[in-house]
Image (cartoon, grey):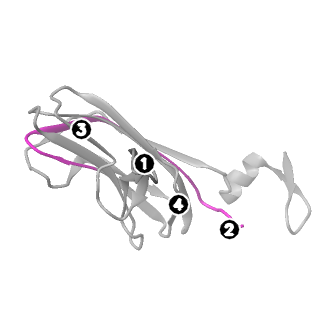
Amino acid sequence: MAWTEFVNGTTADADEVNTNFDYQMIHKKSFSLATENSSVVGATWEDVTDGAFTITHQANALLLSITFRATMKVSDAAGYVGSTVKITGSTLTTNYMDQKLIHNTSGSWSSYAPVLSTNEEYVFYETATSAYNIYGASVSQPLILPDTSTTFQIRYYGSHTHYIKDMFVDITYVNYYTED
């Protein structure tokens, strides 16, 4: 497929447009960390060691989605562990992957839905387990990234000795978009 350039009428194919003008439609970044992290600090959020990555993008890029997966456990069946991804930039209001409780109108059932929020809460949470379990969540909630770089940091907290490993974060974003 070709398109006509604005001034001289020549055409460029999609690869030339992406290379020369960075108009690639969707960017994808994956980050993984297998290393086990553990802590004995109770109910205090902590950064996962080496659990951060930064993307460089155009100012006002648009985050389209984020997927987070991790394996977690606690040392005591009465304990708990929770995890989230923190999203920061120099002028970006800090956001986190979060779970919001959703009730139906009659109050007869409820469920959790992953969202982006300015509250530091867990996106998944495990209680009463001493065996590793795999958890995951995806959020498809657009977020404008006002800076030219954005950092994603995996965080966790829990009671007793709690563990996290085999973490994976996958994001998709676009540098340019149009409000319709």
* Amino acid at pointer 2: Glu
Q: Is residue 161 magenta?
A: yes
Residue 111 coordinates in the image, percent (x, y): 39, 45
Determine whether, in the image, residue 141 is placed left or right of residue 95: right
Q: Earlier in the sequence, mark 3 or mark 2?
A: 3
Q: Main secondary structure of the magenta part?
A: strand
Residue 177 coordinates in the image, percent (x, y): 66, 62
Q: Nearer the viewer, mark 4 or mark 2?
A: 2
* Amino acid at pointer 4: His
Residue at the spot x=29%, y=55% of the render? 121
Q: Earlier in the sequence, mark 4 or mark 2?
A: 4
* Residue on which the image places disc 2: 179
* Residue on which the image places disc 4: 57
State which quadrant residue 151 falls in: bottom left
Q: Earlier in the sequence, mark 1 or mark 3?
A: 1
Q: Disc 3 and disc 2: Cα gap in Å?
A: 39 Å
* Residue on which the image places disc 3: 126
Specify few, some or many for label 2: CA neighbours under 10 Å numbering under 14, 14-19, or 20 or more: few
Q: The residue tagged with tag 4: helix, strand or loop?
A: loop
Residue 40 coordinates in the image, percent (x, y): 7, 44
Residue 113: assigned label? 1
Q: Earlier in the sequence, mark 1 or mark 2?
A: 1
Determine whether, in the image, residue 84 is placed left or right of residue 163: right
Q: Is residue 39 above or below residue 117?
A: above
Q: Nearer the viewer, mark 3 or mark 2?
A: 3
Q: Is residue 168 visible?
A: no
Magenta-colored span: 155-180
Residue at the spot x=49%, y=45% of the render? 29
Q: Compare residues 57 and 7 and report the one nearer the observer.
A: 57
